[in-house]
Image (spheres, rainbow, N blue to C red):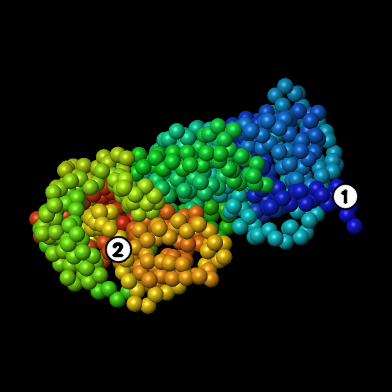
């Protein structure tokens, strides 16, 4: 039998959607205080907020006649008509929070406006008014919430420990205090002050007071975004250092994360960079009403946001300031410590600098792999910027043989392979073949991301020494650099391989034993334009009937296992086919450049070192190897002096 729910039950259900845990209450009350124009906000919690939450502000207050109305469902002073939803400029707007809070707790409210002589004290329990009276107080509002979920025991038992609940509250207030640096926040946990910000409006100072390990952040600016990011070497093992605000609202956003990934590109070896970003956009171009707790928003022009973040990061990421500091790496090496109690989390502990080792699992074939003779390679004096010097067909065939049997590759990059006239193949964007307009995958070719500005001056480097037959010491004024010869050579070889790839035809290697690929009926019945794309990648694939395709040939840069995995994913995933083709090729080139590069403990002569540095300076991106590891790190004179206590 269908019936209308009792109001008491309906209120509890609605409250459950908005209030998940004490954190939700603190967040809603703080947002109300911010919307009220407060310059000081004090938050006090006990037992992780389960037994007691107090939020006091010096904002505009609530008019005495409206204080009870404020706790009615959908009562709000922030919107009045449907069109207001298109340009929301406040953090709260639905009129659900206070009603939801009072439905599952005991709440006492003190509030006074500037033009009132006395304030108002309102006590409510389970959504019902207990008492209301006048009281003396300063202008502003105090909300005291006690016994959260006292009348919904099913929800109460799902709350975590006191320390766990306090931890997420502290974390949230730390983040909010960054954007609202002009507001003085104070958080008291179990009678101890754990956060206190000055409210001076200096965002960077606030960040570093809350997160002491976030040193030497780099400021970025774009059309929509501004904020602070870390250099590529200062990554963390998780995304705690990525904090996003849109129009003052703290959110999670895959769109913003996509812009960060594109901005850093291959400068990141592993982990996640610190990115504290503030976006200011037209309120009409975002939808903040898609999540019950307003944790996520939707952008109308996502690509514009991604591109703006990407460009803002790229404008600064390839400068000398972003070369990883060796002293910084050392101090970031401490591991994360998990707070045993919420009091321990007054500021974030330094987190682990991720140092995952690149694992070469791309090839499963029987290819022999030895390193290219670095002496022969450098003796050719071929610059990366001179490389169309494109390989002749014979030279290309020889190079292809070199890749599958690298024992014969010594001298494979000697002058004899570069007899064609030189022309610049690295104009940052690789030219597209105009003869075949529908080459959606191959003829787009692989472009190496070049820095928007490359301010590092290789000409100022002076050779000073050699450590462990692996690390080259260079100096420029008061900065010393350690260059990893293996990472540097990887970058040189990688860009060389990409040039060879872009300039070559992609032939298929016949399979002695063809294999089949089974698909779903909808994929099998769809248009077959992708079969031409696969043919241009080097696959020989035909229809075999009954939802099946037969593969008689695969590209020379794949083995059978890789080809099968690629085809299954490629054929089924229609949305990402174009990018996936080039991604697979790039992965293979990365692997080859790693195998071919000079290894550590392989001593180079001074002339060879100078040639290596010269070729690195001509790379499109000399700052990192293809895996994202830095090619060099720096020590400043002041850092070295401090280490010696001078």
Tell me the CA gap for discs 1 and 2.
70 Å
Nearer-the-camera pick, 390 or 139: 390
Report the residue at 44% width, 71% height from top.
550
Residue 212 in view: no
Q: Position of residue 32 (x, y in %)?
A: 66, 37
Which of the 4 quarters of the picture holds residue 145? top right
Q: Earlier in the sequence, mark 1 or mark 2?
A: 1
Q: Quadrant of residue 473?
A: bottom left
Mark linked to residue 394? none
Answer yes or no: is residue 619 visible. yes
Q: Are marks 1 and 2 in contact (CB under 8 Å)?
A: no
Position in image of residue 259 (x %, y %): 45, 45
Which element is circle 1 on? loop
Residue at x 32% of width, y 74% of height: 365
Q: Nearer the viewer, residue 319 or 636?
A: 319
Task: Tell which tag, 1 or 2, sits nearer the viewer.
Answer: 2
Residue 475: x and y in percent read 18, 48
Residue 306 point in image, percent of width and height: 46, 43
Q: Residue furthest top?
A: 115
Left or right side of 73 for 578 = left
Relative to 103, 298 lies left or right: left
Give the farthest residue toward the bottom. 513
Q: How many marks are shown on the rendered structure?
A: 2
Q: Are there few (<14), some (14-19), or many (20+) residues within 10 Å of tag 1?
A: few
Q: Is the residue marked by circle 2 packed among few (<14), some (14-19), or many (20+) residues within 10 Å? A: some
Q: Is residue 489 above or below residue 35?
A: below
Q: Residue at x 53, y 64 (%)?
A: 524
Residue, disc 2: 507
Label 2 secondary element: loop
Q: Which residue is mark 1?
A: 4
Name the quadrant of the N terminus. Answer: bottom right
């Amino acid at each position: 039998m269908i019936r209308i729910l009792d109001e008491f039950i309906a209120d509890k259900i609605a409250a459950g959607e908005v209030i998940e845990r004490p954190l939700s209450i603190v967040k809603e009350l703080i947002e109300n205080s911010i919307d009220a124009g407060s310059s000081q906000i004090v938050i006090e919690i006990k037992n992780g907020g389960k037994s007691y939450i107090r939020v006091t502000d010096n904002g505009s207050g609530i008019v005495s006649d409206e204080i009870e109305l404020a706790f009615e469902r959908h009562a709000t002073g922030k919107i009045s008509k449907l069109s207001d939803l298109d340009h929301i400029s406040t953090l709260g707007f639905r009129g659900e929070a206070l009603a939801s809070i009072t439905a599952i707790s005991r709440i006492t409210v003190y509030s006074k406006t500037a033009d009132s002589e006395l304030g108002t004290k309102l006590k409510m329990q389970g959504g019902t008014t207990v008492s209301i009276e006048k009281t003396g107080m300063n202008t502003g509002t105090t909300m005291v919430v006690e016994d959260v979920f006292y009348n919904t025991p099913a929800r109460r038992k799902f709350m975590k420990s006191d320390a766990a609940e306090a931890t997420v509250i502290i974390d949230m207030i730390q983040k909010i205090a960054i954007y609202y640096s002009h507001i003085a926040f104070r958080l008291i946990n179990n009678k101890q002050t754990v956060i206190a910000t000055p409210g001076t409006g200096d965002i960077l100072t606030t960040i570093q007071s809350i997160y002491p390990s976030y040193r030497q952040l780099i400021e970025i600016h774009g059309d929509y975004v501004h904020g602070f990011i870390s250099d590529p070497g200062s990554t963390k093992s998780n995304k705690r250092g990525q904090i996003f605000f849109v129009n003052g609202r703290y959110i999670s956003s895959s769109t913003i994360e996509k812009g960060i990934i594109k901005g850093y590109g291959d400068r990141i070896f592993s982990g996640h960079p610190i990115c504290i970003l503030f976006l200011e956009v037209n309120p009409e171009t975002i939808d903040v009403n898609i999540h019950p707790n307003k944790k996520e928003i939707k952008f109308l022009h996502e690509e514009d946001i991604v591109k703006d973040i990407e460009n803002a990061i790229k404008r600064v990421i390839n400068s000398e300031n972003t070369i990883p500091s060796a002293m910084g790496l050392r101090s970031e090496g401490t591991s994360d410590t998990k707070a045993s109690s919420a009091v321990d989390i007054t500021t974030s502990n330094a987190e682990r600098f991720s140092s995952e080792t690149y694992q070469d699992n791309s090839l499963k074939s029987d290819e022999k792999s030895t390193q290219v003779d670095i002496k022969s390679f450098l003796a050719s004096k071929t610059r990366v910027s001179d490389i169309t010097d494109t390989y002749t067909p014979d030279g290309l065939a020889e190079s292809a043989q070199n890749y599958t049997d690298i024992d014969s590759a010594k001298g494979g990059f000697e002058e004899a392979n570069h007899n064609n006239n030189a022309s610049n193949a690295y104009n940052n964007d690789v030219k597209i073949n105009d003869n075949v307009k529908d080459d959606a995958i191959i003829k787009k070719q692989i472009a190496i991301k070049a820095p928007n500005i490359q301010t590092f001056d290789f000409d100022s480097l002076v050779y000073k020494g050699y450590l462990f037959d692996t690390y080259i010491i260079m100096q420029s004024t008061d900065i010393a650099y350690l260059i990893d010869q293996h990472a540097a050579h990887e970058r040189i070889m990688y860009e060389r391989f990409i040039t060879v790839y872009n300039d070559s035809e992609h032939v298929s290697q016949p399979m002695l034993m063809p294999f089949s690929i089974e698909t779903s009926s909808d994929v099998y019945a769809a248009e077959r334009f992708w079969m031409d794309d696969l043919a241009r990648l080097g696959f020989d694939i035909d229809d075999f009937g009954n939802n099946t395709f037969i593969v008689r040939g695969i590209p020379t840069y794949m083995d059978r296992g890789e080809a099968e995995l690629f085809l299954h994913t490629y054929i089924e995933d229609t949305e990402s086919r174009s990018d996936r083709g080039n991604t697979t090729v790039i992965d293979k080139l990365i692997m080859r450049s790693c195998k071919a590069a000079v290894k550590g403990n392989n001593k180079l002569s001074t002339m060879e070192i100078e040639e290596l540095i010269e070729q690195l300076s001509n790379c499109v991106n000399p700052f990192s190897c293809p895996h994202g590891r830095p090619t060099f790190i720096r020590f400043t004179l002041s850092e070295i002096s401090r280490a010696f206590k001078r």
